[in-house]
Amino acid sequence: MTEGEPLLLDAMLGKLATYLRMCGYDAAYTLDRDAESDDEVLALAQTEARRPVTSDESLARKAPDAVLLTKRDVPDQLRELSAAGFELELSAEPVHCGTCNAPVEPVDRTEPTPEYAPDPAEEDVWRCRDCGQHFWKGSHWDDVAEQLREL
Ligand SMILES: [Zn+2]
């Protein structure tokens, strides 16, 4: 199983999607993509060659390569994924936007950043090419690193 394997997370797994993106996964979220019914989810997975990750047994039965998660809390779900062979470590640098999953790019040291983000002259900052959200390795990054170490 490779870190780059594109995934599609079902409607119940939006929070987990954010964690997987921080680990470098291309983790699309069905509700961001307007896929709600099983058929829509399966069609999207097939079109984009994404492996479904779902907490829905009936959906998992329809997709032979689906990963079925049975737990409700994110740390437990991460443990299930780890047990299924997924590598769960923060990527060295942000790759996918935690909000929308689009690719992120480094912000130049001289570029202005929004008020919520640090000065890129002092700290490495990345920006989502799609939604414009800015990211840096702040305290949230450290918290997630810690959570992943404890799995
Ligand atoms: Zn984004």
Image: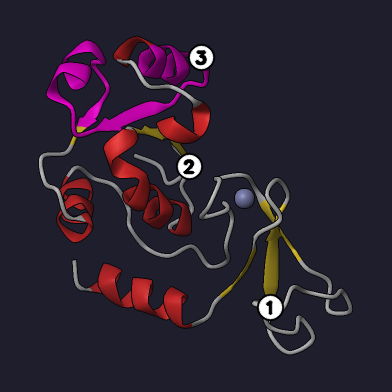
Neighbours of disc 2 within 10 Å: few (<14), some (14-19), many (20+): few
Question: Earlier along the polypeptide chain: callout 1 or callout 2?
Answer: 2
Position of residue 135 measured from the top left corner of the image (x, y, whole percent): 61, 68
Q: Which label is found at residue 4?
A: 2
Q: Which label is found at residue 124?
A: 1
Q: State yes or no: discs 1 and 2 in contact (Cβ < 8 Å).
A: no
> Is residue 60 a member of the stretch shown in magenta?
yes
Q: Write down the residue under mark 3.
A: 47
Q: What amino acid is at disc 2?
A: Gly
Q: Secondary structure at mark 1?
A: loop
The image quadrant of residue 43 is top left
Residue drawn at x 48%, y 25% is 34
Q: Which label is found at residue 86?
A: none
- Give the Cα distance between marks 3 and 1: 35 Å
Is 85 placed left or right of 117 in the picture?
left
Observer-side mark, 3 or 2, equals: 3
Q: Is residue 62 above or below residue 134?
A: above
Question: Earlier along the polypeptide chain: callout 3 or callout 1?
Answer: 3
Residue drawn at x 87%, y 74% is 111
Q: Secondary structure at mark 2?
A: loop
Position of residue 71 measured from the top left corner of the image (x, y, whole percent): 11, 46
User: Which range is magenta?
Assistant: 40-67
Q: Is residue 121 above or below residue 16?
A: below
- Give the Cα distance between marks 3 and 2: 17 Å
